[in-house]
Amino acid sequence: MRALLCRRLSRSLYEAAASSSSSSSSSSSSSSCFRRLGFRTLSSLTSSSKHTPLSRTLLASSPWSATQLRGAKFLGSDVRPGNCIRRKGRIYQVLKAQHTQHGRGGATIQVELRDIDSGSKVNEKFRTDETIESVFVEEKSFLYLYTDDDNIVLMEPGTFSQMEVSKDLFGKAAAYLKDDMKVTLHLCDGKPTSASVPKRVTCTVVEAQVPVKGSTATPQYKRVSLDNGLTVLAPPFVLAGDSIVIDTTDDSYITRA
């Protein structure tokens, strides 16, 4: 009787071991098949998540376009000039933003907005805790071709396609435009909102006062006229015909070219 029980127990243990081996082989085969097809198994994701969260792992393997924030939100207190926002079904660019405090009342943001489509300007107030919808602003590089009255013609280097934009987009920096200069265009929903020139531009001095020899006075900056029609301050040793580098953000002298 004891011998019979031992044989039955041994047979049960053998069958259990065989079943476990078959299941493991099938699982391994399935995992291998999934890997060949380019999928990641749950076990591999789980093991990798010991150091990297599963959500981050899946996000990193997603296409770039699928991870962009569409209609991102921010508070009214974070509104800054240059932002593009969507409000009442229209897209506006923030031109000015000023924080104001009304006694014991809540603070507000007085903003000047420009309608991207019509170009009209409006003034509005935002609460600092108000939720604002942001619109993505794209930056693209173009080459300056020429100016046609109040418009500027640019060319996209990769496609050689031309685009005509208003001169107002460059503001006072339009004076620095030169042939084949690389400029940056800011696009909101495919429409140009602003443009900028390089921070450092080389200009030629066309008129400058000659320094007086033997002067012992402390050297002072003097006004010089540039070939683009602007007048800037430069050191006394700068003469007509010199090439100098100008900071286009504030029209200040940097160095000799």
Image (cartoon, rainbow, N blue to C red):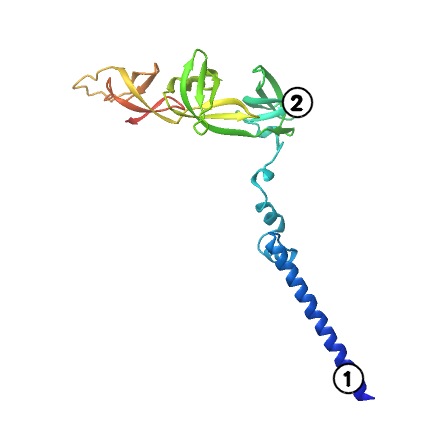
Residue farthest toward the left in the current orientation of the protein:
214
Q: Is residue 143 left or right of residue 77?
A: left
Tell me where residue 164 appears, x and y as whole percent: 48, 18
Q: Residue at x 62, y 19 (%)?
A: 124
Label 1 SS: helix
**Residue beneath label 2, please?**
89
Q: Residue at x 61, y 48 (%)?
A: 58
In the picture, the quarter occupied by the C terminus is top left
- Which badge, 1 or 2, comes first in the chain's sequence? 1
Tell me where residue 204 appears, x and y as whole percent: 29, 19
Along the viewing direction, whichever of 15 and 80 lies nearer the viewer: 15
Q: Residue at x 54, y 29 (%)?
A: 137
**Residue beneath label 1, please?**
7
Tell me where residue 193 appears, x and y as whole percent: 52, 22
Q: Residue at x 44, y 17 (%)?
A: 152
Residue farthest toward the top in the current orientation of the protein:
149
Q: CA distance from mark 1 to mark 2?
A: 81 Å
Tell me where residue 157 appears, x and y as whole percent: 43, 28
Q: Is residue 254 above or below residue 3?
A: above
Q: Is residue 74 above or below residue 123?
A: below
Along the viewing direction, whichever of 128 and 136 lies nearer the viewer: 136
Residue 103, visible in the rendered structure: no
Tag 1: Cα neighbours inside 10 Å, few (<14), some, or many (≥20)? few
Type of amino acid at the residue the image marks with label 1: Arg
Q: Picture quarter containing residue 201?
A: top left
Residue 223, visible in the rendered structure: yes
Please state which of the two labelled residues, at mark 1 or mark 2, is closer to the viewer: 1
